[in-house]
């Protein structure tokens, strides 16, 4: 069956969405690319197949209010509290949590080296509050197996997995009666948007987030609404006025 935006979705009465078509074409291109790479076929019939443009969506992530609720609820557990604050500050992916090595934590300078997505390493930064939480967890952490990983499963004392990290967020969200946008990646979305809303330039945000390019960061998080744009404008003007000499301002008019 041919895929067309105006065609009904297989087994449904509605039309096929751009996301569905995008997914099918991506799978087809990957399949034929694999066949050509293995020299099963000589030419790739899907090489020039273009994926439809997807509508831009604002990925705001977890709300500030819900994040604060989860942080407050996690304070009874030093590990969970440290994980939430670390994610809030660094905007790391789940892999940055369960791959974090103790030797890569620089608590003296509020920074760490994390490893995500195909062993790619990058430096992330965090607040003094998070440093305190990480230090507290380290002081009470049981590590009979002397694991190199920082965050451990409290029952097995082995490094956390993706599922283990996700379950921490899910459990705390359930306690707070939060039903959506509570996953580690939703915290990542919220962190990156907060950097941009605070006036961080796109290049810096992209590097800290570990994106392949500024375009990726801009496409995902760069769409701001009118209220957000005005707030950034007001902050920028306020900083400029604060740094200006009154006499210089008079001469500029």
Image (cartoon, rainbow, N blue to C red):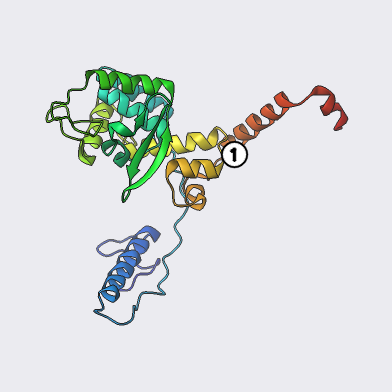
Visible residue check, residue 15:
no
Task: List the residue tagged with mark 1.
Answer: 226
Q: Nearer the viewer, residue 142 or 178?
A: 142
Q: Quadrant of the N terminus?
A: bottom left
Visible residue check, residue 90:
yes
- As displayed, is residue 206 above or below residue 34? above
Q: Nearer the viewer, residue 194 or 127?
A: 127
Quarter of the view holding residue 238 = top right
Which residue is located at x 42 percent, y 28 percent? 126
Q: Is residue 126 left or right of residue 33?
A: right
Where is residue 151? Give x, y as percent. 24, 31
Where is residue 66? Give x, y as percent. 37, 27
Q: Residue furthest bottom?
A: 42
- As displayed, is residue 112 above or below residue 19? above
Quarter of the view holding residue 79 = top left
Q: Quadrant of the C terminus?
A: top right
Which residue is located at x 36 percent, y 19 percent? 132
Which residue is located at x 27 percent, y 39 percent? 99
Q: Is residue 38 left or right of residue 48?
A: left
Which residue is located at x 27 percent, y 21 percent? 137
Q: Is residue 216 left or right of residue 68?
A: right
């Amino acid at each position: 069956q041919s895929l067309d935006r105006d065609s009904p979705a297989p087994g449904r009465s509605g039309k096929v969405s751009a996301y569905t078509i995008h997914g099918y074409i991506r799978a087809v291109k990957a399949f034929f690319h694999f066949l050509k790479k293995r020299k099963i076929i000589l030419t790739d019939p899907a090489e020039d197949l273009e994926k439809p443009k997807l509508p831009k969506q604002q990925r705001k992530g977890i709300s500030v209010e819900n994040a604060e609720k989860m942080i407050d609820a996690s304070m009874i557990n030093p590990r969970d509290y440290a994980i939430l604050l670390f994610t809030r500050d660094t905007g790391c992916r789940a892999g940055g949590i369960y791959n974090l090595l103790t030797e890569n934590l620089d608590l003296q300078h509020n920074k760490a080296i994390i490893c995500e997505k195909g062993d790619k390493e990058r430096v992330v930064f965090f607040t003094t509050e998070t440093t305190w939480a990480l230090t507290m967890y380290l002081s009470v952490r049981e590590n009979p197996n002397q694991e190199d990983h920082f965050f451990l499963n409290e029952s097995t004392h082995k490094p956390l997995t993706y599922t283990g990290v996700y379950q921490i967020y899910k459990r705390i969200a359930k306690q707070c009666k939060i039903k959506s946008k509570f996953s580690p990646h939703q915290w990542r979305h919220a962190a990156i948007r907060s950097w941009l809303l605070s006036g961080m330039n796109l290049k810096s945000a992209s590097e800290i987030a570990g994106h392949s390019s500024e375009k990726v960061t801009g496409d995902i998080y760069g769409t701001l609404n009118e209220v957000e744009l005005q707030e950034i404008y007001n902050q920028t003007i306020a900083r400029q006025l604060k740094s200006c000499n009154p006499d210089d301002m008079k001469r500029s008019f």
